[in-house]
Structures are given as structure tokens and as C-alpha cells.
Amino acid sequence: MRHLRKLRCKRMPPGLLAPPDEADTPGEIPDVDSMGIIRFSDNDDARIKRRVKRILERRKAASGLEHLKRDDRERLEVLKDGARLIQISSEHRADEIAAALHEDMPWMAAATEVIWHAMRRSVREGWPGFRMPPLLLDGPPGIGKSHWARRIGDLLTVPTAVIEATGENASFGIVGSQRGWGGSHPGRLIETILQSRIANPVMVVDEVEKAGTVVSMNGHAFGLAEALLPLLEPLTARCWSCPYYQVKFDMSWVIWVLTSNDHRRLPEPLLSRCPPIRLRHLTLAELTGFVLREGTKRNLSASSIEAICEILSHPSLRRHQPSLRVAARMLGRAADLEQGPVLH
């Protein structure tokens, strides 16, 4: 209405308009004529409403959310201004994080070196957040691959989601399922970002080579590796389309850590995006060192820590490779016993 008034004021004789001092700014034609000369007909009103309707429709189309239900639009409303990116403050901070990782798990040095260089690069190049290439940690079970990934999340202060590939319905647990599928739902990836509002969480896919393939009723196969491919490639991850919401998101900042016991069972396209980092078994000295550090963090008594180290170094166990998983269970059991009630 204001725009239409200005157009018609230009066609009016100057003497019929309001004095110049009633204008909004010097030299500008007033928005409302004081004599009420410019009036709107029913046809004018209808034209304005049609134009408003078109503007609203185009705004909805540009948002990409017009196809969603109200509840889904409200859920995505938290991301209307984007999500926060966690940064590495300085190269010195990158060195501190890498040193802490290496001190806790020195047998993971090959993986720690990759993330160390990625952290320093993000600082040197002035990235708005920390970004690193997807990792595939390949090695024997029980050496702490998932524990190492969770430790990254703790040191970076970003949320961490661990997905057991053997327990998920192919990719549905990670990326979600389309609404045509029974029990459709959003995936853990978008849920983690919606809950934390952080765009570079740590997503851990454990034992990725053991994931099965889901086949729909019409015969379409949907495997985990195929669903991960566009997320592991930076160019396609920037405009990744969520199967559930059918909305595009920039997922290029997500930190992916995949673990496997035998990378040879994985498809070549996945391996080309995530070259496997080969990891070895722990030595007995590394395992006892881990027990000493973790036992101290849990405030275990010296006698409990010594007992665990003695059991792990017993000659009867020398035929077996030392397992971090077994040591972690023993530490947890010792903590329960020490904190439990004393029986008389």
C-alpha cells in the first residue's frame, strides 16, 4: 500500500499533496496524503493481497520447508541461523590435544598423527571450525579404537555419537529413512546436530564391515557403505539431502571415525574415501600403563591397580593378546567393589 501511494503521489499535482515538512525525510514524497485524496479501491486491495500471497509462496519455496508438517518445521527451526562450529584456538592447542591423545593411547600413534596435522592445518588456513578427513581405523578387536574416537570428542568438547554397525538396520540408524518406509525416522546424524546445535560432532561407526543390507519390499537394496559415501566426500556432503526431512544440509564439517577389524570386506569406493590406518595389538607394558592412568583417574586404591596389573601379566595369559576391553571391565569392577557398601 505504501509503495502504491508513492507511485500515485508522483502523478498528482504538487499543490494537492501535503506540505514538504510532513514528509518522512527532506525531499521525499509523504507516504500518506493528509487530505485523503489517494484512496484504494476493492480492485487495488485484491491486487495487493495477490502480490503478498505470491511473495509468501516464494519465501516458502526458497526455504525448502514447505513440504514438511508443522512439527517437523518447528524442529528444524533451531537451525534457521545455522549451527555452531567448534574451532581449534591455536597450533599450541592442537599440540596439547595430540599430546594428550598420545599419552593416553600411544599404540594409536598413526591415527593421532593424522588428526594432529588436521588440527594444525585448520588453524593455519583460518577455517571457521575444525575439519578433518574421514578416518578408517583398521585393527584387531579390543585395542580401543572406539575409545580413542570418544576421547577426541571429549578433548574437542564436541558431542560424540557411537553407532554399532552390527546393531543398526543398515544405514537407517545413521542417516534416517524415507517416509515411505515403515517406522520412518530421522537418523542419528541429524538428531545429534539438532540436539547439540554443533555442526562438527564426532560420528563413530563401529565395525563398519559387519553392517548388513536392508532390502525393501520392491527389491531395492540399501546398505550402510552406500549411504556413507556422499557424507564422506566433502563436495557432496555440502548439499547432503536428509532422507527423512527431504531438506539439504551442509554436513561437510562432521568428523567421521569408522572402525573395522578387516578392511578387506569393505567396498573399494569406501576405501578410496577412507584409506585404512593399520593399527597393532597392545603390548603388555602399554596395557599396564593404561591401567595405571585410568585407575588413578578413577581414584582407585594402589592395591586394586596393582592387582589388575598382576592379573594381566600372569603367565597363563601370555598366549593371548592383551585386550583393552578386558582391562576396562576389570577397572570398572574394581571401582564398583571399592565404592560399594562394606559388609560386616
Image: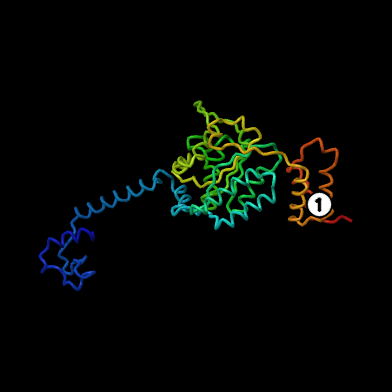
- Looking at the rendered image, the quarter that the N terminus falls into is bottom left
Question: In screen coordinates, is 318 left or right of 176?
Answer: right
| Residue with the mark numbered 1 | 305
Which residue corresponds to the image point at 66% horizontal and 45% vertical from the top-left?
109
Q: Quadrant of residue 14?
A: bottom left
On the image, the x and y values in percent for residue 309 come to: 81, 47
Q: Quadrant of residue 163?
A: top right
On the image, the x and y values in percent for residue 189 come to: 54, 44
**SS at mark 1 in the image:** helix
Q: How is the image coloured?
A: rainbow
Question: In screen coordinates, is 71 left or right of 322?
Answer: left
* Furthest residue toward top: 219
* Furthest residue toward bottom: 21
- Eyeballing the image, is 6 above or below 293? below
- Eyeballing the image, is 269 above or below 32? above
Name which residue type carries label 1.
Ile
- Looking at the rendered image, the quarter that the C terminus falls into is bottom right
Q: Nearer the viewer, residue 304 or 64?
A: 304
Q: Quadrant of residue 314?
A: top right
On the image, the x and y values in percent for residue 295 come to: 76, 53
Disc 1 crowd rating (10 Å Cα; few below 14, some 14-19, many 20+) is: many
On the image, the x and y values in percent for residue 307 come to: 84, 49
